[in-house]
Image (cartoon, helix red, strand yellow):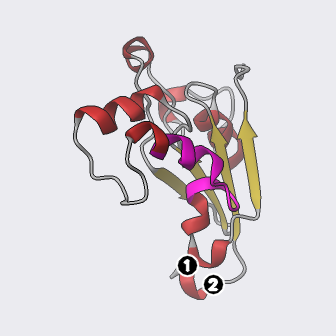
């Protein structure tokens, strides 16, 4: 369906682990600060996940509004938990990467438009947010 549509706006977010990417995207897309965070469109990192050092979002989560805006929440870049998962689960790496940490680093610096978002149809990430280490309140 989206491949045939050209009048969509895609908004993606990139950032380190635990910096509030999911919260920002939820507030931009459909939720208000007064709502319970457990009801947000993009689920934020739980306290248990934080304590374990894990990441909440894996891959890319999306939400499409009635106004045809596609919001994309991505897994963290340079994430120690993703590196740990690659190492401990013997995930197959693309042949051009010989070590897991090289793969994770290259994901972070290969931002053609919006990191893994550049794999979208026609590379249509029109707005990208890069979220830094400051927390979102």
Q: Which mark is residue 2?
A: 1
Task: Please identify the residue farthest to the top as the structure is shown.
Answer: 51
Which residue is at 55% across, 41% downward?
105
Note whether 124 is above or below 86 in the view shown. Answer: below
Task: Please identify the residue farthest to the left as the structure is shown.
Answer: 89
58 or 61: nearer the eye?
Answer: 58
In the image, taking residue 103 as reference, residue 112 lies left or right, namely right
Give the SS element for disc 2. loop
Q: Which residues are magenta?
A: 103-116
- Count of numbered marks: 2
**Where in the figure is residue 82, as x and y percent of width and height?**
41, 35
46 or 128: nearer the eye?
Answer: 128
3D distance between C-alphas at marks 2 and 1: 5 Å
Mark 1 Cα within 10 Å, few/some/many (few <14, many 20+)?
few
In the image, taking residue 92 as reference, residue 16 lies left or right, namely right
In the image, taking residue 13 as reference, residue 99 lies left or right, namely left
Which residue is at 71% across, 45% downward?
28
Mark 2 Cα within 10 Å, few/some/many (few <14, many 20+)?
few
Which residue is at 32% across, 39% downward?
86
Residue matched to label 2: 5
Dividing the picture into quadrants, the one containing residue 96 is bottom left
Could you tell me which quadrant the C terminus lies in? Answer: top right
């Amino acid at each position: 369906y989206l491949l045939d549509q050209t009048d969509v706006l895609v908004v993606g977010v990139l950032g380190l682990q635990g910096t509030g990417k999911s919260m920002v995207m939820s507030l931009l897309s459909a939720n208000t600060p007064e709502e319970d965070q457990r009801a947000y469109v993009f689920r934020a990192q739980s306290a248990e996940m934080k304590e374990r050092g894990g990441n909440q979002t894996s891959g890319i989560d999306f939400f499409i509004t009635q106004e045809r805006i596609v919001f994309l929440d991505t897994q963290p870049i340079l994430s120690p938990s993703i590196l740990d998962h690659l190492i401990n689960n013997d995930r197959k790496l693309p042949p051009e990467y010989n070590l897991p940490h090289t793969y994770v680093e290259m994901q972070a610096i290969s931002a053609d438009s919006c990191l893994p978002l550049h794999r979208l149809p026609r590379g249509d990430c029109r707005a990208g947010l890069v979220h830094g280490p400051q927390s979102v309140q």
